[in-house]
Amino acid sequence: MALSQSIQKDEILPSIHCSTFTNTDIIAYCSDPPSTALNAIPLGRYGNSVIPLSDQEVVKYGPGVYIEEYMNLQRAYQLLDQSIVRVPQPYRFFQNGDFGYIVMEYMKGTVIGEITDDSHIEKVGKALEHLSSFRNPKPGPLGGGVSRGLLWSEGTTTEYSLYGSAEKLEHWFNRRIKHNNLSLSFQECDFVLCHLDIAPRNIVWLHGDSLCLVDWASAGYYPRIFEWCLLDIFRGRDGPFQDLVKKTLEPLTEWESANRQLIEKAWANSIRYHFPPTPPCA
């Protein structure tokens, strides 16, 4: 039975597993979803959409949905302790033209617009501490591919993949520092699991007040300071949230304190200036 035939207009789907539906069914459903589906998930609109397929699954789709996010979700779901931080189970990724589609577990809960409660902030801090306990010898998205998200100027390092190369990561940042006497080296860094988009809109509070992190598009193994810098860069956007979360994190090391401003300077310059693709020499 086609997905469009399983639902009457303005009704949420019944309890049907996504394996019942083909990619074509899902594409057709997303092209004209019922209004109740559009309003069912209280997430902000940032170019992509998330709507229920049933009472068990949702689909995230749009021009900014990529295979790297699906692979990040897969790896995070396998690694993380679900008693500390929940992650939606990913079921399927497919591409149709410029649109990507991720079918994943429906995490029913509440999104709090401004998080200030001490117990909630403490849980966010513990989740970040848990993430940073996972390390990898080389940087990049959890499943490989192109680094994407808020840290990388226009949302992606499409000029070349940074995956597996500290040298490429250094090259990307040092080009954007734009100072002859200043540069970054990541050779002595630990690359830890980072989410890189910690914000109230990406936290679903589930039954029992457990925490679920969504939107894993930016995640990867990077220096821990990257998580801190993103909180710095978007400080005040969600009230005191960013400052409160930073207080729960371990103090910065000497290297992190010395290089924090350079990382944020590179980010700012990547917004202000255009950098033609010039990958480092192999």
Image (cartoon, rainbow, N blue to C red):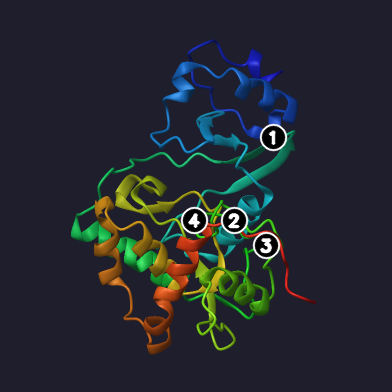
Mark 1: give few (<14), some (14-19) or many (20+) Cα within 10 Å. Answer: few
Residue 232 is situated, as x and y percent measured from the top left of the image, at 34, 64
Q: Is residue 255 left or right of residue 122?
A: right
Q: Image quadrant for the N terminus?
A: top right
Q: Quadrant of residue 173?
A: bottom right
* CB within 8 Å, label 1 to label 3: no
Label 1 SS: helix
Which label sits on residue 19? 1
Label 4 SS: helix
Residue bearing the label numbered 2: 274
| In-front residue for pair 103/263 | 263
- Name, please, the residue furthest toward the front: 180
Label 3 SS: loop
Which label sits on residue 143? 3
Residue 2 is situated, as x and y percent measured from the top left of the image, at 70, 18
| Residue type at tag 2 | His
Q: Residue at x 73, y 68 (%)?
A: 279
Q: Residue at x 26, y 56 (%)?
A: 241
Q: Give the distance between the C-alpha atoms of the residues marked 1 and 4, in whole angstroms.
A: 45 Å
Mark 4 vs mark 3: in front? 4
Mark 2 vs mark 1: in front? 2
